[in-house]
Image (tube, rainbow, N blue to C red):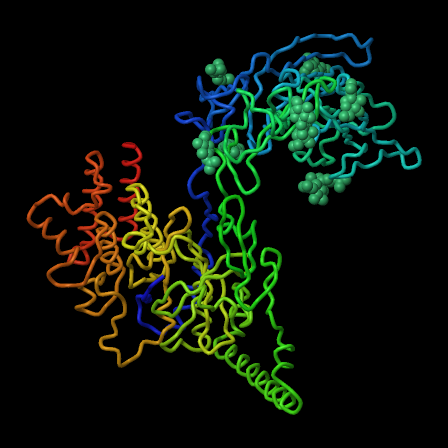
Amino acid sequence: MRSKCAMAISSSTSRTQDLVPLLCLLLMAAAAPQHSCASPPLPVTLPGCPDKCGNISIPYPFGTKEGCFKPDFEVLCNDSFHPPRAFIQMAGAKITVDDTYYKTNEDGMPDNDIGSSEWPIELVDVSVSEGKARVLGAFSYDCKMNDTYHAVRRQEIDLGYWMPFSMSDADDVLMGIGSNVVAKQTSGPQCQSYLLYQLSTRKTDDPVNGSCSGQGCCSANLRSGGMAATEVTIQKNTKDDGGFYGDGVSCSYAMIVDKSWYNFSSPDVDSDAFLRRNAAGVPVVVNFSFGVDGCPNASEPTPDDFACVSNYSTCIERPPVLDNVSIPYFCSCSAGYEGNPYIHGGCQDIDECARPHMYPCYGGKCKNTPGDYECSCPAGTKGNAKQAPCTDLFPLPAKISVGGIGGLFLIALMVFVVLIRNEKRKMAEFFKKNGGPTLEKAKIIKIYRKEELTPILTRSNFIGRGAFGEVYKGLLDNQLVAVKKPIDGNVAQNDQFANEVIIQSQVIHKNIVKLIGCCLEVDKPMLVYEYLSKGSLDDILHGSSGVLLTLEQRLNIAAESAEGLAYMHSKTGKIILHGDVKPANILLNDCFTPKISDFGISRLIVIDKEQTDHIIGDRTYMDPVYLRDGILTDKSDVYSFGVVLLELISRKKATYSDNNSLVRSFLDAHKNQKEATELFDKEIAKPDVLKILASVYEIAVSCLNLDADERPNMAQVEASLLKLKADLGMIN
Ligand SMILES: *[C@@H]1O[C@H](CO)[C@@H](O)[C@H](O)[C@H]1NC(C)=O
Ligand SMILES: *[C@@H]1O[C@H](CO)[C@@H](O)[C@H](O)[C@H]1NC(C)=O
Ligand SMILES: *[C@@H]1O[C@H](CO)[C@@H](O)[C@H](O)[C@H]1NC(C)=O
Ligand SMILES: *[C@@H]1O[C@H](CO)[C@@H](O)[C@H](O)[C@H]1NC(C)=O
Ligand SMILES: *[C@@H]1O[C@H](CO)[C@@H](O)[C@H](O)[C@H]1NC(C)=O
Ligand SMILES: *[C@@H]1O[C@H](CO)[C@@H](O)[C@H](O)[C@H]1NC(C)=O
Ligand SMILES: *[C@@H]1O[C@H](CO)[C@@H](O)[C@H](O)[C@H]1NC(C)=O
Ligand SMILES: *[C@@H]1O[C@H](CO)[C@@H](O)[C@H](O)[C@H]1NC(C)=O
Ligand SMILES: *[C@@H]1O[C@H](CO)[C@@H](O)[C@H](O)[C@H]1NC(C)=O
């Protein structure tokens, strides 16, 4: 988080005039999708087994290859579909579909029995931690095609009896849709849906959208411990007293279905809309389980085929089946752990502190422990920070009364009141001075009160110091943030500051650090940014973090940083320059996605006129053309980025010195037609990737061209790096 920075708009006309069109352009810029990731991917399959079929995750005990699944959990991945689709391969698993045409108004004998066909059961997703999978089931229907014909389909889904799959009575229901229909599960529950014909109004009742309680839609709970072999039929589908049948094809439906999936809507009654929408089937939740003797108790040795093999996994019993003879179980990771309990080492500790949304620690000090986390209130405060913000050990009134005995008390109180009033007045003045009214009107950025930010500004939260000031880490609205508090330099005044803040808060790009809010009730406004857990690229490359980036990660960081810069250079219509591109200004999140920081902060600092030559920024990375002419262009950022590329491939610090800099060594090697190989970071310079490293080096050299016009622009640099990334993907 150490940073100096600069940003400039490439024309030198009055700034306030520039801001309006720029703001509009930025407002139009599309927001990048929220980027999130799990830091190290947890293993979900046995070693060497494919963990995906198309975009469906296939975790063990499921598997697509021999040796990769438990008995009955084989999955066929059929890649003749795009994306590929997964089908359950257990012997006997199938959906049987029976189609018949009936003639209306005759004796009820089938007119044309099409016969039955069988389909494989498609797997849609698996939730290992809950012991559940979702599959696509068929549904039964009875459709009046025209005045003479009914097309009737009966379906049966068969996943065997009880083991290992069973219908989840907690998630699935029997459901019927129609104006007069009985849906029935063979030797199971049934339900009736009916729309009453009102003689007085000569109309049928209206179905109620969103409600499935008998009017146009009915549902019934499954028998608990239900088998996965299930047949659903429509028992009758007649229209004896009213004219609800719409024009055209009119259908009634019966099915077993995931009850959270469907929201009843009246156009589905007596029409073929539902049939057309769900031709592929409807989702059904099945539990999967193991064993017949329940979980082994503590005194018993675990059976050889016990499924819960991971450390920190627990065994959970299902309801007994087969008339209480058999008790199946499934496995889950213990509390505080996550992953796949069915493989060795599958359950891993959850880093709760990295997920403050789910595991709050309100302003306390968060510490991850195996299976849990600690969250302690800072010294001088008390409470349970996991549940609510800590409170002062000695509340203000108590402090006052301790200090104020007799007359002293009164005097103290008066002084206190005056101080508070002064403070309040000052805060209001600052708020106005810093453009608060403008920002409040804009309503696009969070404006924090001084009290909300001051608890964060403690020594224990301090994480660094940059050109703008000190940086603190804290938790606001359950989100980790970095608060930047200016220390010296004058901050630009009034609406200019406000406008800068508005612009910055509108720049939404996955590779640019996001401004969340600010606090204006102080002399020098504080800014609140998203917090990036991995710190800066400079720390990672040269610090003691112990993290060694792979070539793939480095290429990714390079390409995505280039994307962020290219975005600011071009996509916003008006060029916004950074002016101080360097590893310390490239911050990394959990998944090492780079985000450029401090775009534009420098404009908030009115440059001290006495300062030697107006050049802000780090000379090590500074474009010599800019040093000579004093004119910052987009190609100056390109030059600086070239130095960053050299640093990425060499993991050597770039230093500013005439005879011994990183740039010098590389360029000398280039001039003398020598291989730069020995300058590459030994950790990544493996023989099969030397060509790729050499190409990165060539890109860097073109960025460092002393003729600025000859340098590529950031978009071209990004494209070249993306291509190298793809090339590397082919090698790995
Ligand atoms: C997989 O891809 C299909 C079609 O592209 C999409 O409808 C589905 O939601 C995707 N599933 C997942 C789990 O991403
Ligand atoms: C994959 O699906 C296609 C189209 O349904 C089918 O013809 C083919 O037999 C399937 N492949 C396998 C291996 O089942
Ligand atoms: C009714 O539909 C059936 C099946 O689609 C068709 O064979 C028949 O010719 C149709 N009859 C009339 C009168 O449209
Ligand atoms: C279902 O639909 C109704 C009305 O269309 C709506 O009010 C309700 O929020 C919906 N429920 C869900 C879970 O989508
Ligand atoms: C399926 O799992 C749910 C819990 O997720 C449980 O409530 C239900 O009883 C289970 N049903 C069967 C048949 O195992
Ligand atoms: C139910 O919602 C649909 C849209 O999903 C709408 O067309 C229909 O009129 C609604 N029916 C009732 C009775 O509100
Ligand atoms: C442990 O298992 C034994 C034998 O199966 C049984 O008798 C005993 O009740 C079990 N103990 C507990 C605590 O369930
Ligand atoms: C985890 O399990 C392995 C065996 O799979 C065992 O060697 C190891 O000691 C266990 N680790 C812990 C922390 O219990
Ligand atoms: C199975 O156990 C449940 C309660 O645990 C009991 O109500 C039921 O009668 C038992 N059924 C048989 C066949 O023993």
What percent of the width, then of the height, locates residue 661? Answer: 15, 58
Q: Is residue 502 above or below residue 331?
A: below
Q: Is residue 207 left or right of residue 308?
A: right
What percent of the width, then of the height, locates residue 694? Answer: 18, 42
What percent of the width, then of the height, locates residue 719? Answer: 29, 45
Please identify the residue farthest to the right as the structure is shown.
Answer: 200
Closer-to-camera residue (523/49): 49
Q: Is residue 406 left or right of residue 270?
A: left
Q: Is residue 699 left or right of residue 14?
A: left
Q: Residue at x 8, y 50 (%)?
A: 671
Q: Residue at x 46, y 47 (%)?
A: 35
Residue 183 can be seen, yes or no: no
Q: Is residue 68 left or right of residue 230?
A: left
What percent of the width, then of the height, locates residue 180? Answer: 81, 26
Q: Quadrant of residue 147?
A: top right
Q: Quadrant of residue 644?
A: bottom left
Closer-to-camera residue (483/498): 483
Q: Residue at x 77, y 17 (%)?
A: 187
Locate ligand 4 by image quadrant.
Answer: top right
Total labels: the figure holds 0
Q: Quadrant of the C terminus?
A: top left
